[in-house]
Amino acid sequence: MRYTLIKLLVFCPIRQREIWELELGRTLKREEFGYVIRLSPEDHKTGSATGLSREFLLPEVLTATLDEWLNVWRVRVTTNYQLVFISLGSKRHSELIGQPLLE
């Protein structure tokens, strides 16, 4: 997951909060040509002031990485939501596994 997050930050001008709140099927969508991030005005920092949406077509180099994260690894953690990135916990804090990432 860390590799996917770093790669996303390198190739996409997106804020941390926007990453934490990415939801599969709502703000992150898989199209035939790759992934698209579509943020409504409520989903990003300046949206309330501008009323504008933001859209990012993610570079092809991210497609295989996101496919692997979402289809191989993310599906192994059962949650009640479709957040793309979740806490993986640790040996000391296994109760955090599957929880939303915190600010």
Image (cartoon, grey):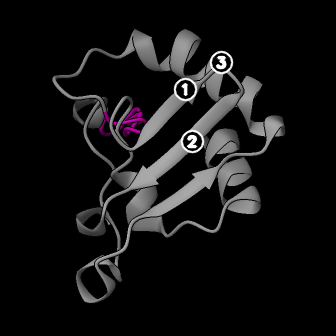
| Residue at mark 3 | 68
Q: Is residue 20 magenta?
A: no
Locate residue 70 relative to residue 3 in the image: left or right: left
Element assignment for label 1 = strand
| Residue at mark 2 | 36
User: Compared with residue 62, is residue 66 higher up or lower down, i.e. above or below?
Assistant: above
Q: CA distance from mark 2 to mark 3?
A: 16 Å
Nearer to us of marks 2 and 3 is 2
Looking at the rendering, the stretch of residues picked out in magenta corresponds to 83-93
- Marks 2 & 3, CB-CB < 8 Å contact: no
- The residue positioned 60% from the left and 55% from the top of the image is 56
Quarter of the image for residue 79 reads top left
Extreme residue toward the right, this view: 61
| Front residue of 45 and 32 | 32
For marks 2 and 1 on the same chain, the one whose residue lies earlier in the sequence: 1
Check disc 3: other Cα within 10 Å, few if <14, some if 14-19, many if 20+: few
Check disc 2: other Cα within 10 Å, few if <14, some if 14-19, many if 20+: some
- Marks 3 & 1, CB-CB < 8 Å contact: no
Instruction: Name the mark on residue 30.
Output: 1
Q: Position of residue 51 (x, y in %)?
A: 28, 78
- The residue positioned 42% from the left and 33% from the top of the image is 88
Element assignment for label 2 = strand
Q: Secondary structure of the magenta portion, mostly?
A: loop
Q: Position of residue 95 (x, y in %)?
A: 22, 32
Q: Which image quadrant: the N terminus? A: top right
Q: Position of residue 52 (x, y in %)?
A: 36, 74
Locate residue 35 relative to residue 49 in the image: left or right: right
| Front residue of 100 and 91 | 100
